[in-house]
Structure formats: C-alpha cells, structure tokens
Image (cartoon, rainbow, N blue to C red):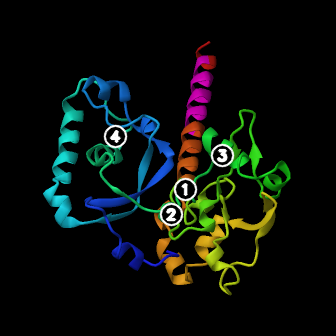
Amino acid sequence: LLGDVSDLQNLDLQGHALAAAKSCSKRWSDLMNFDELKNMGFFELSPNSCALSRAVIVLDVQRWRRQDVTGKIEEWIARSKTNAVELWKDGSSLVPWLLATGENYAELSEQWACTGLGHDGMTIEESQQIRRSGFDKKSLRRLGLHTDKFGYLAPHLTTCSGSAKLLRFDGSVRPWLRDRFLNAAPVCALPTSLYGAPWVPPVSTRIKVFCEWAAFLNCSALWWSFMTEDMSCALKDFEAEWQEDEDMWSSRKKDHDWSLDMENMKAMDDVDA
C-alpha cells in the first residue's frame, strides 16, 4: 500500500453501490461468451470493454442492499447453471459480478489497480503497448526482457507501479513462490513515492523512456523491501518446499521399478526359450 486510504473513505460514489478501477489487461470478450449473451438479449456492454479489477473495491453497503447487487450476482450464477451453453470461461467468479455491475459503478483511478506484479510473461497486447510507450530495444535488453518469435515480451514489465497507490503481486511467480520456478523475475518501475527511501533496495536499472530517465528493479526486490524476516518466514510454504522433488523421486522410482520388471520378464523369456 503506497497511497492514503482516506482518499477512498471520502470518495463520492455518485449514487452507485460501488467504485472500482478498470483493468484493460482483460477485456470482456476474454472472459465471457458474448454470442450467447446476445442470444439471451444482453447487449449492454461492448466485448472490447475493459474488465474491472477487484484489487480494491469501495462499497456503500446500504446502496448495495437496496440495489440488490448480491441477488443479481446469484441470478447470473443460476443462469449459467441452467443454460445449455457456457456463459463464461474457466468457472470465473469475476464474471457474475461484472454482469451484475455492468456500467453501474464509480470509476477509481488506475493508481489503485496496479496488478500483474507476479506474472511471468505478457500478452501480445501488453507487449505492443510497451513498445509504443517509449521503450527502445536497448532499454528492454538492459531490463533483461526478450522478445520471442511471435512478438511476446518476457518477463513481465510493470510500468503502473511508478505512480501506483496499491501494488498487487498476483500471478504464478509471486515473490514468495518464485524460488520454486526457473522463470525470470518480473520487472517493475520504481514507485516515485519511494525515490530516496533508505529501506528501498539500491539495486535498480536506470533507462530512458521517451527520453526521460526512469528507474526499474526486480518486482520481488520491491516486495521484500516491505517484509521483515519474520513476515517472510510466515509466508514460506514449507509443505511445498519439497513437493517437486518428492514428485520427481516418486516418478523415478516408478520408472526404475518398471525397468526392473521388464528386465525380469525378458530374463524369464530367455530361460523359457
């Protein structure tokens, strides 16, 4: 948390039951079956509309109850169970909330929805946006990013962290899990509010973005600069520490036993012959 939550407490919801920020890393068409929704007579939103982020939501509980938002969410869940064709993908819990909310929300600043700080790669749209945002080839190489043969950038590069009020470390390579993966760590713009802070890791890479100097660092390093040693230990997944090794050893043992069985069977066949 880098911002002042009192800004949220004093927010004018403009008669809506909630406020949330848009997250254009996901579009409505990425999440739901628009052809089927149109067949049901639902035309309120464009497939290209940005989804909402649930990283931070401001609720007016009384308005939420009066507008029966919970009931609308339950209605969409019930429809999905009885409809012959799937309405949304992957059993997402986000979609019923999006459909129940529609455009009936107050918009939060994107500074409250800086997400993806634990993602291991970028979509083609995100990759194209980075290339349009003042990063030249030399700068991306200095940050350790590479482009595959289809134009996808990796690891993930987060620029919203520079002005963010909240950082959300979601994704498969979250800092407290990253030591279990071989993926390169995501890269983050150093928040301007932390420039010069004594507890922020001094290791950063300065590059020019649109000819202006900016500092970037490993997102994991940014996370751990907020964590004490005790907090770090509390987050450690001790059960998962050996899981991959245990699975590997078990698989090897099965392969070994199978090889022995094959050798014994061959030996018996040779004797019979």
Tell me if 181 is positioned left or right of 79 in this view: right
Q: Nearer the viewer, residue 188 or 49?
A: 49
Q: Give the mark nearest the N terminus, 3 or 4.
A: 4
Residue matched to label 1: 116
Q: Which residues are magenta?
A: 257-269
Most common SS among magenta residues: helix
Q: Is residue 123 visible?
A: no
Residue matched to label 3: 129
Q: Amino acid at mark 3?
A: Gln
**Residues under labels 1 and 4: Cα distance?**
20 Å
Q: Residue at x 36, y 24 (%)?
A: 35
**Percent x, y of residue 139:** 81, 55
**Residues under labels 1 and 2: Cα distance?**
7 Å
Residue matched to label 2: 168
Q: Give the mark nearest the N terminus, 1 or 2.
A: 1
Q: Give the mark nearest the N terminus, 4 or 2.
A: 4
Frontmost of labels 2 and 3 is 3
Residue matched to label 4: 91
Q: Residues within 10 Å of mark 1 (few under 14, many from 20)?
A: many
Element under disc 4: loop
